[in-house]
Image: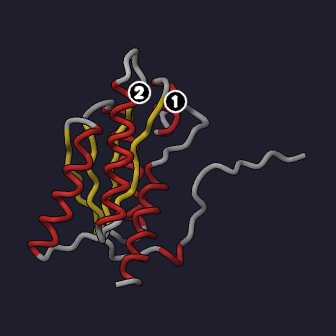
Amino acid sequence: MTSVNVKGLAAKKDAVQLDAHVVIVKTRWNEAVINALVTGAVDKIQECGGTTEVIEVPGSYEVVYAAKRMIEAKQRRGEKIDAVICIGCLIKGETMHFEYICEAVTQGIMKLNVEGDVPVIFGVLACMTESQALSRAGLIEGHHNHGPEWGQSALEMAAIRRMTM
């Protein structure tokens, strides 16, 4: 019997908006993991003909505010913004801080999607160990980087946004 890997996002080229502009809001915490994820997302978006803009915030808690402000500012100025990807990495420590930040960021990004008109992709890893974070960033052999999937998701959601305007 052959083993089948069911993880990961299947490529869907017909849904990709080739001229999309995606803003990536990334954190400074867990820099090696974040840089790999951002590179993966940017490469995928550019490979599909899109453009990116990367802004940096201190930590995962701040990505929601930055995403909201970038959307508002670009819309107010008449600048192009088709999607946002929030990229962060939370690693469980010894206190409840991890749970509080995870919940706040999850709810904040969900609220931006429900109440706003620009799709915001949830690219925040919530890992129990450093090894899990490194794996999900493709920094451990045999594991894949989730960044390209987030880039593809942003393009697909930008296409849905454009279809429904």
Q: Which residue lies furthest to the top in this view?
A: 94
User: Looking at the image, is mark 1 or mark 2 earlier in the sequence?
Assistant: 2
Picture quadrant of residue 116? bottom left
Q: Is mark 1 on a helix, strand or loop?
A: helix
Q: Nearer the viewer, residue 36 or 77?
A: 77
Q: Residue 91 carries which label?
A: 2
Element class at badge 2: strand
Question: Which x, y percent locates residue 30?
Answer: 33, 30
* The one of 101 and 66 positioned closer to us in this rendering: 101
Q: How many marks?
A: 2
Marks 1 and 2 sit apart, C-alpha to C-alpha, by 9 Å
**Residue in the picture at 30% in, 71% down:** 117
The amino acid type found where label 1 is placed reads Gln
Cβ–Cβ under 8 Å for marks 1 and 2: yes
Q: Can you give x and y, in whole percent of width and height, for residue 29 in the image?
A: 28, 31
Residue name at image x 25 percent, y 36 percent: 59
* Residue plotted at (41% across, 76% down): 159
* Quadrant where the C terminus is found in the figure: bottom left
Q: Which amino acid does label 2 sit on?
A: Ile
Left or right: where does residue 19 sit relative to residue 78?
Answer: right
Point out which mark residue 89 bears: none
Q: Position of residue 1 (x, y in %)?
A: 90, 46
Task: Identify the image quadrant of residue 75.
Answer: bottom left
Point 36% across, 81% down: residue: 162
- Residue 107, horizontal then vertical, whole percent: 36, 48
> Dot 1 corresponds to which residue?
132
Crowding near pointer 2: few (<14 within 10 Å), some, many (20+)?
A: some
In the image, is residue 87 above or below residue 161?
Answer: above
